[in-house]
Image (spheres, rainbow, N blue to C red):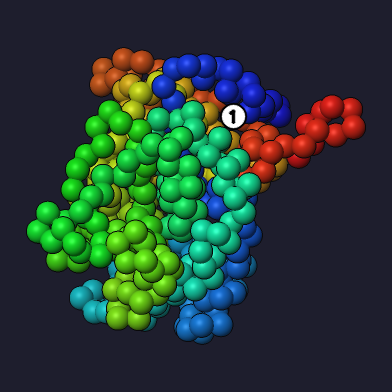
Amino acid sequence: MILKLLTYDEVQSELGTGRSHLLIGNGFSIACDSRFAYDSLFDFAKQHGLPETAAGVFERLGTNNFEGVMRLLEDSDWVAKHYGLLPRDSDSKFIDDLEKIKQSLIDAIAQTHPEHTHDVDASKKDTCVKFLEPFHNIFCTNYDLLLYWVEMHGQKILKGRDGFDYDINDPEAPYVVFSEHVGGHKGVYFIHGALHLYVEHGDVRKHSWTRTGKHLIDAIRESLSIGQYPLFVAEGNAEKKLTQIQNSGYLSYCLGKLERINNALVTYGLSFGENDQHIANVIAHNRNLKTLYVGLYGKPDSADNLETRKHLALLHKKRIDLIDAGRISNSLDIKFFNSADVPVWSPLEPDRNGEIVF
């Protein structure tokens, strides 16, 4: 049986005037510019320092998915030690390559990223502001600067806060620090970190153009040149991701906020794959969430979408188990909509018959 997808107009109609929230994944960035696709990042990484052994794993698997390869290397290290092929307390080539893949991913994103917010057409950002405007909280799993740029472009309309402010110990510092919770205000949360965030002396800091006059990408590349890497959650599996998130006050706050939102959550560009299960688990445990709208791109019964639907079925089952155990009282309604039907970066154009084409 083929799943019937809602249109985005139908989603908006169902959301009505009640409070709703948005969770975006890599599909959000790819829809703006194909350079954010994993194959583009892999090509760059392969040409700029990705170890041949690691590149061979990508090619053997026929994938450009960094997280999938990192997970395989981590599992391979465990298997080799479990079977006594490597000493249990030793560093292995598997883990060495895994760390180099993480670094190459960060470098690839930073070096292939658009240079400046003006490299994204103002009309695209205007359209994206309209897309983001109805949502109270916006959660992002991406590392790039696109969401941040749009938020700055439409600040008077979006009014999203991120919890960063001047450093009370150094008010004139060229950066701002995470220092306050957003509370009931509209908020923006980078669940997996982002290029413009970094850790220094125990603080999570944010590069600031207004305080330095430097383009963010220039500041980020300067930091990379001295070995100061962005705050990234680039682990190979959901369990490792969750551990890294829990070890950061900022990241754990962002993920915890997702578990406390109410009413409805819309997701766009997120596959809910194996690497996203820490997010799925938080959604399943959110006792205040009533409806989850999940965007699917392409045919509902494509291999990728069937995989997404399988993981959403597991999320739904987990919710039912929590209800049966008396830990949560309300169910979670999961609905699917057509991602191609969403004017994220460009308005949808009517065809000659007045119908929307996409």
Q: Is residue 110 something one can see in this rendering?
A: yes
Q: From this viewpoint, which residue is outermost toward the left?
A: 169
Task: Determine whether 306 is above or below 148 in the image.
Answer: above
Task: Count neighbours of disc 1 (C-alpha within 10 A) and say few if under 14, some if 14 to 19, many if 20 or more.
Answer: many
The residue under the point 36% across, 15% down is: 330
Q: Which residue is mark 1?
A: 336
**282 or 44: which is nearer to us?**
44
Q: Please state if 61 lies on the left or on the right of 85 as rendered.
A: right
Instruction: Judge whether 234 appears above or below 259 on screen.
Output: below
Q: What residue lies at 23% left-to-right and 50% top-to-bottom? A: 165
Q: Residue furthest right?
A: 352
**Residue depicted at 48% across the width and 16% down the height:** 17
Q: Position of residue 77 (x, y in %)?
A: 35, 71
Q: Which image quarter holds the N terminus?
A: top right
For the C terminus, the image quarter is top right
Figure quadrant of residue 83: bottom left
Residue 337 in the image: x percent, y percent?
62, 30
Q: Nearer the viewer, residue 75 or 110?
A: 110
Q: How many marks?
A: 1
Front residue of 229/313: it is 229
Q: Is residue 327 left or right of residue 101?
A: left
| Whether residue 92 is visible | no
218 and 214: which is toward the camera: 214
In the rendered structure, which amino acid carries the disc numbered 1? Phe
The residue at 16%/58% (across/down) is 171
Across and down, in percent, residue 82 comes to: 30, 68
On the image, which quarter does residue 223 sit in? bottom left
Callout 1: helix, strand or loop? Answer: strand
**Does 39 appear above or below 180?**
below
